[in-house]
Image (cartoon, rainbow, N blue to C red):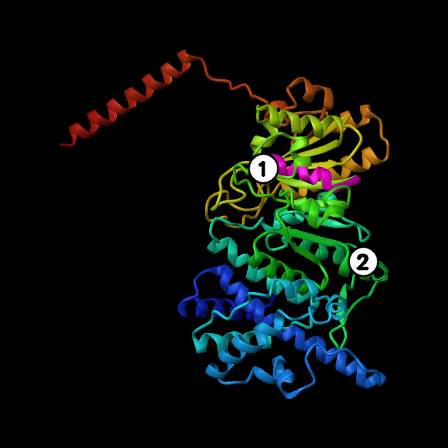
Amino acid sequence: MLTGKIRTDIDKLWEKFWTGGITNPLTVIEQISYLMFARMLDMQEDVAERKANRSGNAFDRLFPDTPEGQLLRWKNFRNMSGKELHKHLKQKVYPFFAKLGIADGERGEREGLGHISEYMQDADLEIKNESVLASAVEMVNDLPLTQSDVKGDIYEYLLSKLTTAGINGQFRTPRHIIDAMIELIAPQPTDVICDPSCGTAGFLARTMEYLNREHSSESGIFTDEDGNQHFTGDQLEPYRQHINTEMFWGFDFDTTMLRVSSMNMMLHGVNGANIRYQDSLSKSIKEHYPRQEQNYFDVVLANPPFKGSLDESNTNPDVLGLVKTKKTELLFVAHILRSLKLGGRAAVIVPDGVVFGSSKAHQQLRQELLENNQLEGIVSLPSGVFKPYAGVSTAIIIFTKGGSTERVWFYDVQADGYSLDDKRTELKGEGSNDLPGAIAQWQVYRQMVDGNISDSTINTLFGDKSKKAFVVPAEDIAANKYDLSINRYKKVMYLQEKYEDPKVIMQRLKGLEQEIQANLDELEGML
């Protein structure tokens, strides 16, 4: 967790950017990201130098071993004057970012810098105010970036500013919703995980945090004097190479988001995450990523954009073969189905229209999920989850590729721990957050299913449709045109109200009227 001082320092810097004329929150985060990246490169070089000095072995330098090359290092330029610093960053340091991993591709891949350098091609210094630049450099220099468990929190706090400021209609999935979805899917260290519309890589970064929590010993993670990350337990260490270079995949076609998400993953201890430029629904994905386009991923976690219609001529024809539509929310679910390997599982946020829409395409997709795959769960979310930027009602659909569906588990989340108005104030107390209950009930249900518990036993626990968690047989859903709306199946309990006999009420009213009249007569007598 971040200390109050770090949060306060970030808030002060944020205010400096605002008063210095940089008011777009994504630009602020991007500019801070560049500086953090510059410092982290220097930290990596320091670690390599210390190891080389101890071992006597040569090492591949990130920075050229020349006076000019060494001036590109954070420790050698951070004390420059404002005007000199601005010129040096803009003309020499930032252009150097774009060359990482290009002149020597092998080195870039090994250091985990090959991908991020692609998105630094158009990195530019937009901090014109020398005072703001000096403050930004000073703050970044004071951040505890050697502490892997803290630097991720730092970046998460920076990214949280997007939810309060907004970015041209884009908004992040709330962190607690991401965490709940990850708990529902429970990724493993051996999985290959994807977000086909990754944005700031919230799902991927939080998955790494989940793995650290669930697959390390109680004392957690520490770093040595060289900044190397270690696990006190041995559960994750055998998978370190897989986690760092193969586990995480994120696709987006916004280069700013790609820079931010690459930095987010680096700060969560994953240097080699596969953050790639690609429209996941475009037919070009078959050319650029043919292996990842179909039967590749173990887990997909996503909140795809609900932005209306796409140009059908540019859409992947294989996705259109699953569902003939122009609606992105339907196409993304179809794409996710294709990208999963057999037995792969997904948790995806969709607008409510996906679960109950009556068009042929809506029904076609739901039929595909139900009859040719295992549609396991529907978690209905309250309509205020994405306020103040969208009031649309949404649901989390949970499914596994392949097989067929016997029953679908439903859960009705009516409160997510925050007020459902534009302020989204955190709430405390009983009944303020249904998400922990949803996760607990899901885990009980999955244990019963995985343990081959009989249908009668499952129905005993989850058969009451008046409760928050219940199951519905697949044949009942098919009979309702594959409608997955929770209100279609949830049983509403009505309590009978008892009222007094009207004659008794009339007598009481007459008594009150007589009492009022008596008081009026008494008041009149006093005049």
Looking at the rendered image, the quarter that the C terminus falls into is: top left
Kind of residue sitting beneath label 2: His
Our reading of the magenta stretch's main secondary structure is helix
Badge number at residue 277: none
Helix, strand or loop under label 2: helix
* Of pointers 1 and 2, the one earlier in the residue sequence: 2
Mark 1: give few (<14), some (14-19) or many (20+) Cα within 10 Å. few
Residue at the (53%, 50%) spot, across then down: 171
17 relative to 58 in the view: left or right: left
| Position in image of residue 356 (x %, y %) | 59, 27
Residue 381 showing in the rendered view: no
The residue most toward the left is 527
In the depicted structure, whether residue 80 falls above or below residue 499: below
Residue 333 showing in the rendered view: yes
Residue at the (64%, 27%) spot, across then down: 484
Tell me the distance, in whole angstroms, between the alpha carbons under discs 1 and 2. 37 Å
Helix, strand or loop under label 1: helix
| Position in image of residue 504 (x %, y %) | 41, 14
| Position in image of residue 27 (x %, y %) | 50, 62
Residue 264 sits in which quadrant?
bottom right
In the depicted structure, whether residue 237 falls above or below residue 341: below
Kind of residue sitting beneath label 1: Ser
Badge number at residue 313: 1
In the depicted structure, whether residue 260 falls above or below residue 178: below
Looking at the rendered image, the quarter that the N terminus falls into is: bottom right
Residue 345 sits in which quadrant?
top right
Magenta segment, which residues?
328-342
Q: Which residue is mark 2?
A: 242
Mark 2: give few (<14), some (14-19) or many (20+) Cα within 10 Å. some
| Position in image of residue 476 (x %, y %) | 70, 19
In the depicted structure, whether residue 406 falls above or below residue 307: above
